[in-house]
Image (cartoon, rainbow, N blue to C red):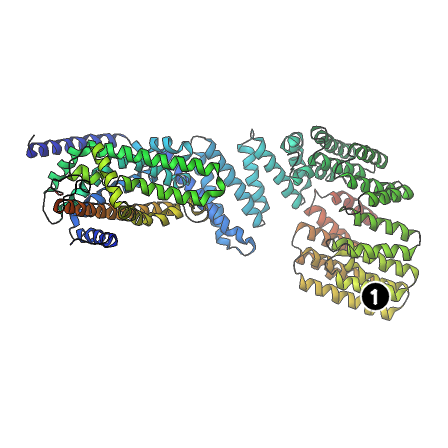
Amino acid sequence: MSPESKFGLFLWTWKEALKAARKPVVLLPFFIYALAQTLIVAGLIFFMYPPFSFVFVPLQRVLGGEMALHYPNYFLSLPQAFDKVNFVLSGILGIGVIGLATLMFAAGARPMPLGERIKIVGGRYGHLFGAWIVETALSLAVLYGFAHLAARVPEWGIYVTAARVLFVILVSTLCAFTAALIMLERQSFARALAGSLKLFTSHGVVAFFLIGLPSLLQLPVQFVLSKSAVIVHKLNPEIIAVVVLAGIVAGMLANYFVIGTITSLYRMIAFEAKNNPQPQAAPNRRAAVRS
Amino acid sequence: MKWTSFNNMLRLFLLISALALSVLLSACGADQNLVRQVEIEKRYFGAQKILEKIYINPNIADENDFKLAIAQFHEVVQGASTLPPSEVLDSVIKGSLARIGQLELARDNVDAAVAAYQEIVKRFPQDDEITVSARLTIGLLHERTLQYNDAIAAYSLVLPSLSSRIAPQDPEMYLLSIPFHFARLHKYNPHEAERVEAYRRAQECYQTIIAKFPNSKAGMTAVSYLAALMADQEQWQKLDGLLHQQIAKHANTPELPHFIYTRAMTLHERLGETARARALLEELLKQYPNHDVAPQARFEIARMILAQNQNEAGRQILKEVIKNSANNPGLAARAQEEIAMSYEREGQWVQALNEYRWLAKQYETLPPALNALLRVAYHYTNANNQQLAQHAYDDAIAYYQGLINKYPRSVLAALAQEHIANCFIAQKRWDEAAAAASGIENILDSAVGKVSSYMLLGNIYESSGQNERAIKIYNEFIQRYPQHPLAHMLKQKVLELTNS
């Protein structure tokens, strides 16, 4: 099927992502990542008990100071502490999950042993890491830039927040195709970034919505977590942990749809480039999907 | 490298990593102190949640919640005491003990509340901030239960460091009142040397605050208390000198009208210099016509005019005072009472009766209203009109009973009950008067209610010639409240009644 309109393309990618869920193995990387995140949340809550105490007591001290070792303070600091640890986790495990998931979505019905896919990811890990560094640096620059702006013009608070969200999604859209290019076309991270920028010029709008819409799943969680102090003092501190866990589930679903739809979109772009060769449209003439 | 060999190496690596990790984790156990500390903090947090629930409305809170919260706070204190001391644990212990005190107080368990605050003082003697607050609370609680010597002992320890706890521009008023309280507790002390020393210490405390924080809210309030202490000791010339000095010193402060007013009242009421007092008040009204103290100044000028038998002029000013005292019903009621009394003095009884009735109807929660119907009955008694007097007493008793039903278990109800007793006393219906006096204790189940009940009963028995009963009731009072300032006076009275 070759969707004619951009909207048709958008719907087709979602359909493809949903179809991929028929094979539960596709969900495996996301479950592994969510499991690792859950263990981190458990560690940040039960830091005083073994086996967590060895790592998480000093970690809590580093992240939140001595006060973070006291109840209910460690629930108050949980969202920020989790974000920091999750940031590191995304640079270590997250990029592997993206690479593996990209391979699985691209493989479609073609079978390939899991071990072999892990081996491919291992081979491309350095490039995935390079791309992650660049994307993260850009995102952090956007976040800090807008934080600075918000401090200078506090009366624009709500507009600055909205603009910040849009710009972070924009950065992700600019780098949307790097994983596909690194994993499927075996490009270096620098070329993959350049290629992703090229594809952004032709499919940026579709990619923006494919990334932006699943990201909305996180908004309710973020809103609730912004009221952490009220929840801790007026309701129950343990609710914070439940909300963070809900955030992990929301993040897992969002990641599934972002990687699934973007990989499907790339497959379609590569397929069209192969059948209608146009040098500027497709970044690589080699097979889009290596089985 | 072939896939199979990579796979084997990966498996080997995972196996070694798992072994190393399990050895490492089994080697390090939990930090037991940290685990217990977090458990204690959780319990403390849980107890505070119960406390919040109780504080929504302590009057209708479940007794089990009180018990549970107190038990949990006690457990927290016990548990935290066994751990190595730290800033957080100390604050948890202090918080728990203070909350135990609050909860016990809410249950009227004063002894347990005092014990909790004493525990704070015992555990943290070096922590001035918490010990001063705890000692003050202990003092207030002892005062509440009429254990005045214990209250004096608690306040006495606080006085030296009190000025260091005062925030100059936003002082806690109860802190500033403590030296005055301390001195007042000695007012009826039979030993003059102790009484004089107590007033000297209180004055010294206020002088320190005035010197330390001149031109501040705390300093101004300290001046007011210093003036009150002088008034208490009837040092009128000294008081006039102090106020004169303050008026000159604080020419441009918001407190100036208060100082002028107080000085005028001292001149009028204590030094007999009414003309100077009136001139001061009139000058005050001229300079500060819209100040808070202005209606009060007008009221006092009106009283001075009435005292000169210029009734119509005085009443006109009082009517103005009533008109402008919508936010101060106490002053309006007093003005209304003055108007009624002026008509009565003039012999215009119909107008006086109307004003008294209006007063009783309009300001029923205020003391002048309670007195109004009793004054009507007294008027008929003095005029030897027994029939109308009887009617007036019956009306007054019905009115007071209505107030008791409308505001049950309140100070107002206790006052109304006292007025019922006074109605019976005026009619020499002694048994009914004694029964009414005993009823005060049932309405106001506090030390104040009990003291009022005892004193009124004693008076009734004395007035009705039942000296033995009076002696019995006074002895009971002395036994029950040995530290009460009246105890000494009552001992002498018992001696007089025994010898008579």
Q: Chain of mark 1?
A: B
Residue extending furthest toward the bottom: B387
Q: What residue lies at 24% left-to-right and 34% top-to-bottom?
A: A131
Q: What residue lies at 28% left-to-right and 30% top-to-bottom?
A: B28
Taking B310 as reference, is A126 above or below it?
A: above
Asked whether residue B363 is in view, the answer is: yes
Taking A221 as reference, is A73 above or below it?
A: above
Residue placed most toward the observer, B146 or B172: B172
Q: What residue lies at 69% left-to-right and 39% top-to-bottom?
A: B177
Taking B127 as reference, is A30 above or below it?
A: below
Residue placed most toward the observer, B324 or B212: B324
Q: Secondary structure at mark 1?
A: helix
Question: Where does label 1 land, which residue?
Answer: B354
From the top left corner, tell me how far across and down residue A15 is, in percent. 21, 54
From the top left corner, tell me how far across and down residue B387 is, in percent. 86, 71
Classify the position of the N terminus of chain B by image quarter: top left
Location of residue B137 by image quarter: top right
Amino acid, disc 1: Asn
Taking B30 as reference, is B324 above or below it?
A: below
Location of residue B212 by image quarter: top right
From the top left corner, tell me how far across and down residue B37 is, in percent. 40, 36
Q: Tell whether A38 sits left or right of A182.
A: right
Location of residue B227 by image quarter: top right
Asked whether residue B429 is in view, the answer is: no
Q: Could you classify mark 1 by the number of other residues whose Cα lies within 10 Å: few (under 14), some (14-19), or many (20 or more)?
A: few
From the top left corner, tell me how far across and down residue B85 is, in percent. 45, 30
Q: Tell whether B158 sits left or right of A206.
A: right
